[in-house]
Image: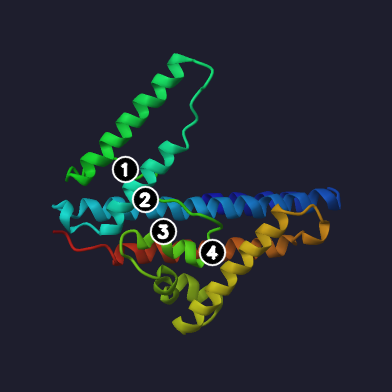
Amino acid sequence: MTDLTAISELVSVVETSGTSARSRIASVNSSTLLLAARFEEFIREQGRQYARETVQLQADARTLPRKLSATAWKRTLEELARAKIDTGGTAVSLETVSRDARSRVDAVCRFLEGDLTQEIYGSLVHNESNMRPSQLNAVFSICDLKDVCSKVSDKPPLLSYFEDDDAGRVHGMLLIRLNDFMEKRNNIAHSLNPGNSLSASSLHDDVAFFKALGLSIAVTLPLHLPQAA
C-alpha cells in the first residue's frame, strides 16, 4: 500500500506546486499508467503466493490442482521459447541460454514428478492483457479458486468504498469500476490527445478504489486455501 500512497503524494505535490497545466496533466496521466502497472504486478504477486501456499499445504503432487501443474509446464516452455539467442556466434551467450533452459526444464519436470520444493512460480502467473475482471479471475483459477471478484465483494474495504452493504450490487459495481479504469488507462496509453487526461481528484479516487480492492483480496485469499493434506 506504500506504493499507492507514493502515487497520490506525487500528484498532490505537482497539483499544489504552481506548475503548468501541461505538467499537471502529465503527472496525472503518468501516475494513472503507473497505478495500472502496480496493480497488475500486485495481482501477479498474490497469484504466485497463493499458488506457493497451495502447494505447500499438499503432501502429494497428485492432490494438486491439475491446472496448476499444466500451467507450470506450459508457461515454462513459453518463456524458454521467447529467450533471445545471440545468432552472432557468441558462445557464452548460447551457453547461458542453454544452462538456464536445462535448469528450468529440470525444475518443472521434478515438480511434475512430485518434488514440490521446486521453484516454478516465476513464470506461472501471466496476464494476456489488461487486468480486467476476467484476467484477475484467471490468475487464481490456476489453483481452482473461481471468481475471486465475486468472493472479494462482501469484504468490508470494498463495501465501504462503494457505500453499499449488498455484496451482489458491490460485485456488479466492482466489475464496472475495474473495466472503466482499464479503459481510461488504455485511452491515455494510446493517445496524446489532452482530452484523454484525468483530474487529480479522479486519480485519488482510483487510488482509494485499488486500496480497497487490494485489502479485500488480501483478506479473501487465506480463507480459500485448501486444507492441509
Q: Position of residue 64 (x, y in %)?
A: 22, 57
The kind of residue tagged 2 is Arg
Is 131 situated left or right of 181 in this image?
left
Residue highlighted by disc 2: 48
Q: Position of residue 84 (x, y in %)?
A: 50, 30
Is 189 situated left or right of 174 in this image?
right
> What's the distance in space between the residues labelled 1 and 2, CA to CA?
9 Å
Residue highlighted by disc 4: 132
Comparing labels 3 and 2, the label whose residue is closer to the camera = 3
> What's the distance in space between the residues labelled 1 and 3, CA to CA?
15 Å
The 10 Å Cα crowd at callout 4, few under 14, some 14 to 19, many 20 or more, is: many
Secondary structure of residue under mark 1: loop
Q: Nearer the viewer, residue 65 or 149?
A: 65
> What's the distance in space between the residues labelled 2 and 4, CA to CA?
18 Å
Residue highlighted by disc 1: 120
Residue 16 visible in the shown view: no
Q: Earlier in the sequence, mark 4 or mark 1?
A: 1
Q: Nearer the viewer, residue 160 or 148?
A: 148
Q: Earlier in the sequence, mark 3 or mark 2?
A: 2
The kind of residue tagged 3 is Val
The kind of residue tagged 1 is Ile
Residue highlighted by disc 3: 139
The 10 Å Cα crowd at callout 3, few under 14, some 14 to 19, many 20 or more, is: many
Question: Looking at the image, which residue is at 34% across and 52% down?
Answer: 71
Secondary structure of residue under mark 4: loop
